Image (cartoon, rainbow, N blue to C red):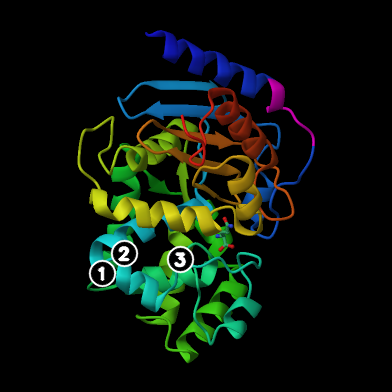
Amino acid sequence: MNILFNDVHDALVNAYSQFSSFKGGENASYIPYLATVPDNLAAIAIVTVEGDILSKGDSEFRFALESISKVCSLALALEDVGPSVVQNRIGADPTGLPFNSIIALELHGGKPLSPLVNAGAMSTVSILKAENVENRWKRILDMQQQLAGAPVSLCEALNHSEQTTNFHNRAIAWLLYSADAIYCDPMEACDVYTRQCSTLVNTVELATMAATLAACGINPLTQKTVLTAENIPFLLAQMTMEGMYGSSGDWAYTVGLPAKSGVGGGVLTVVPGVMGIAAFSPPLDTMGNSVRAQKMTASLTQQLGYNLYKNR
Ligand code: GLN
């Protein structure tokens, strides 16, 4: 272990001890399963591009991937149809509105603007090359596993909880259909999108996903090439613009690294060329981002001086 790695270890411990029990926020409750997850859980992990792993807290606990799954499906769409098609048919701009906003669609002629909001994520699922619904789902699950470098599976209880309460997302899918902005059966896209949100990962697996993006698409644990290196900047740019929803601007201003949150309490952050970071804790702020995961990540990256806009 070199000195730098010791510094990272100290910064991780410090970030965790300062913010893992920080008060504030509430579990998501519009998906009944998420309301039942203990709200005192907290973890932070890093995986370097060399494959070194550090973690602190409840890093073995598997939680709902939720919207972080949008990154995996976008990664697959970039492989399937390329960055220009993604930009022209889905978008590459922030919406400035909540992740499930219908107003955002109304304002832009039915175009989702970002693949990282619910509308854009369903559009992204629909644009993938797939023969049928099960093949579409299998390809997405496989991408989640390749990025994580570990088996990832659907949580039946969570999927049931989501599929029986996702009326708002179904309405969004039909609005996309009416605007010619969804490219398979809208209910198929909504079904598969709901499944992709209903998988479970632990914090180290999430950090490995981030590390694969940090390492130009090569998973540092399996050494397999998962993504085309040329597509990674497009993915990271989308994360910068919309990854933390309405807080994406504040996140860029204060943390300066591409990230993606999910209402399961996870936040995935990429330090290109260096490491992937994941933090987890269920209570969310009003934007739907984990309060403690944001604090722990900001603390860790600031202590280490990681910020894309900083000359290191
Ligand atoms: N499954 C959730 C939804 O569609 C994901 C939202 C999120 O994590 N921001 O609402």
* Mark 3 → mark 2, Cα distance in angstroms: 10 Å
Q: Residue at coordinates 40% horizontally, 75% vertically from top-left?
A: 188
Instruction: Look at the numbered disc 2 and give the secondary structure of its residue.
Output: helix
Residue type of the residue flagged with mark 2: Ala
Is residue 19 highlighted in magenta?
yes
Q: Residues within 10 Å of mark 3 (few under 14, many from 20)?
A: many
Q: Is residue 290 visible to us here?
A: yes
Residue that label 3 marks: 115
Horizontal and vertical percent position of residue 253? 62, 46
Contact, CB < 8 Å: mark 3 with mark 2? yes
Q: Is residue 72 visible to us here?
A: no
Residue type of the residue flagged with mark 1: Val
* Mark 3 → mark 1, Cα distance in angstroms: 14 Å
In this rendered view, identify the residue nearer to me: 189 or 296.
296
Q: What's drawn in magenta, residue-wise?
A: 18-23
Residue that label 2 marks: 77
In this rendered view, identify the residue nearer to me: 96 or 309.
309
Contact, CB < 8 Å: mark 2 with mark 1? yes
- The disc, 3 or 2, on the residue closer to the chain's N-terminal end is 2
Residue type of the residue flagged with mark 3: Pro
Tell me the tag on residue 81. Answer: 1
Q: Residue at coordinates 68% horizontally, 60% vertically from top-left?
A: 30
Contact, CB < 8 Å: mark 3 with mark 1? no
- The disc, 3 or 1, on the residue closer to the chain's N-terminal end is 1
Which quadrant is home to the N terminus?
top left
